[in-house]
Image (cartoon, coloured by chain):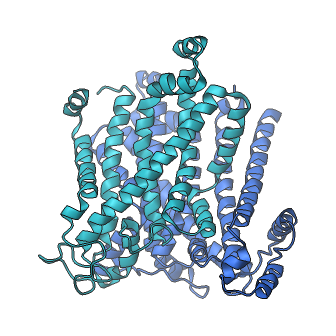
Amino acid sequence: MSGLFGLVARRIAMGFLTIIVISILIFVGVEALPGDLATAILGQEATPETVAAFRKELKLDLPPHVRYFAWLGDFLKGDLGTSLANKRPVAELIEWRFANTLFLAASAALVAVPIAIILGILAALYRNTLFDKTISMVTLSTISFPEFFVAYILIALLSVQIIIFPSISNINEQMSLGQKIYSIILPCLTLTLVVVAHMMRQTRAAIINILASPFIEMAKLKGIRRLRIIVLHALPNALSPVINVVALNLAYLVVGVVIVEVVFVYPGLGQLLVDSVSKRDIPVVQASGLIFAAVYVSLNLLADVLSILTNPRMRNPK
Amino acid sequence: MAFFKLLRQSPLSARIGLAMVLINIFAAIFTPWIAPYTETEVVGDVWLPSSSDNLLGTDHLGRDMFTRLVYGARNTIAIAFATTILSFLVGTIAGFFAATLGGWVDQLLSRVIDILMAFPTLIFALMVLSVIGTSITGLIVVIALLDSTRVYRLSRAVAMDIEVMEFVEAARLRGEGIWWVMRREILPNAMPPLVAEFGLRFCFVFLFIAALSFLGLGIQPPLADWGGMVRENAGAITFGILTPLWPAGAIAFLTVGVNLIVDWFLHIASGLKD
């Protein structure tokens, strides 16, 4: 059992290391800016005095490694610096937007995961029938569609042709949970459609893979019913790949949310990131980039750890 | 010819896919002859419905939508294609080097790429573009480098399998250089999976550039580009005008086409017979 613990601990340590390296990359990326951040923001016509004052304000006069550790230390304490665009603390800008992003991603996951797994199992069960072929054709198309295409089709259908859902998902803190859910229905549906396609295809592939193994053949020869074989024999063994698929898609969801947020003008972290990139508001870009990366890395880490835990064969890598 | 023989045995879905891709390539090559107007010519009022003058109506500045769509095919496909080529050049060369040299070269490259792959691509691209600004060259280089990590993974794995074959050993014993071995022994044998991957990566890069342009950080106006055109015309949808669906649909059309071909190709490459 200690081997298992060591394996998981090593994987978690790798995850932390990755996040540290990413934070260095994010920091160095800004260092590599041609010229200087101060001149880039103030423009060419700024006087040397204002540039010097601004450099001091951004602490650009200190050596890079000192600034990196100061930045990281502040970040861990929750002080994310101040926005260059509106001089407000970054933490204040990010906090409720991040909560909104998680709310949207979690709602989409709550709808998408059960649908994807059930459809995946059904497609594997009735594979090569008309049902399976239809689903596979539909999901292949949804994967090929850009998120905004799906989003605008949904808007055109459900908020312009038939006016049932709002095309802009404005939410604020005063709203009740019901109102919030109503206003995120379209973005949630968009994300669900995109993610279900991926997840369902991979679930189907994982289960079909298991169905080819000898013990399933044995179960069939014993005359056990198809559904029972799938639920009791195939599913427990497919659990590891399926959990992996779900965690990876959740990671995809958190990042894929960026475009959907922009389409529906949803006040989330992705929208903030895109706005800040076009305004070159570097502190906000750095902070939100690091948060997105940390969530993404953690979910990938979770996928790895869960598949180690659910698949005994992975505990003894060759 | 072998290709036509293969085509005759191809399933219907692959033929549909091929037709979809050919329409796009045709539009991209013969752009000025197909498009009734020039790329940035204003021909009428804003968001006109389709008529005999403007096949698909006009856009948010009164330019002909059909013309913009055809020019968009040329710009968007050319940039995505250039990016994918660059990504494959970097990715396969690095991957083959890692597989043939092994040792610390392999270790170093693989660890660096592991970390780059742990970073969500869209977020990474957004951050880099916020620093270097948006230019077409920058866009191509950034996306190609990010995407080459995936190509590296595949080409390294494929080359590893080929590298241990007797004919590679024979070539080495003959005293052939590493570059010769990579080019003449490994590359031809690694072609089938790499070609299928090229289709997949092209789709990914194409959608990725479209997404960045949609966010306003990719190809910049007045250049016609499908992702950017969706963004520019997005406001129309709330008035029940379906203009933004044309470029978005064009993106979907091309990616579905490429995916259908890739599916067929993977089927052949895996040696499955129905």
Q: Quadrant of residue A69?
A: bottom right
Q: Residue at x 63, y 47 (%)?
A: A303
Q: Residue at x 81, y 85 (%)?
A: A53
Q: Residue at x 70, y 63 (%)?
A: A32
Q: Look at chain A in the picture and name its colour.
A: blue
Q: Is residue A82 left or right of residue B235?
A: right
Q: Is residue A61 left or right of residue A15?
A: right
In percent of width and height, residue A285 lies at 66, 71
Q: Look at chain B in the picture and name its colour.
A: cyan
Above/below status of A209 relative to A114: above
In percent of width and height, residue A110 lies at 53, 62
For the N terminus of chain A, which image quadrant?
top right
Q: Is residue A167 left or right of residue A31?
A: left
In percent of width and height, residue A182 lies at 47, 78
Q: Is residue A213 visible?
A: no
Q: Is residue A169 left or right of residue A250?
A: left
Q: Is residue A14 visible?
A: yes
Q: Quadrant of residue B123?
A: bottom right
In percent of width and height, residue B66 lies at 23, 70
Q: Quadrant of residue A271?
A: bottom right
Above/below status of B14 relative to A107: above
Q: Residue at x 42, y 45 (%)?
A: B200
Question: As rendered, which of A11 and B224 lies closer to the eye?
Answer: B224
Question: As rendered, which of B178 and B117 lies closer to the eye?
Answer: B178
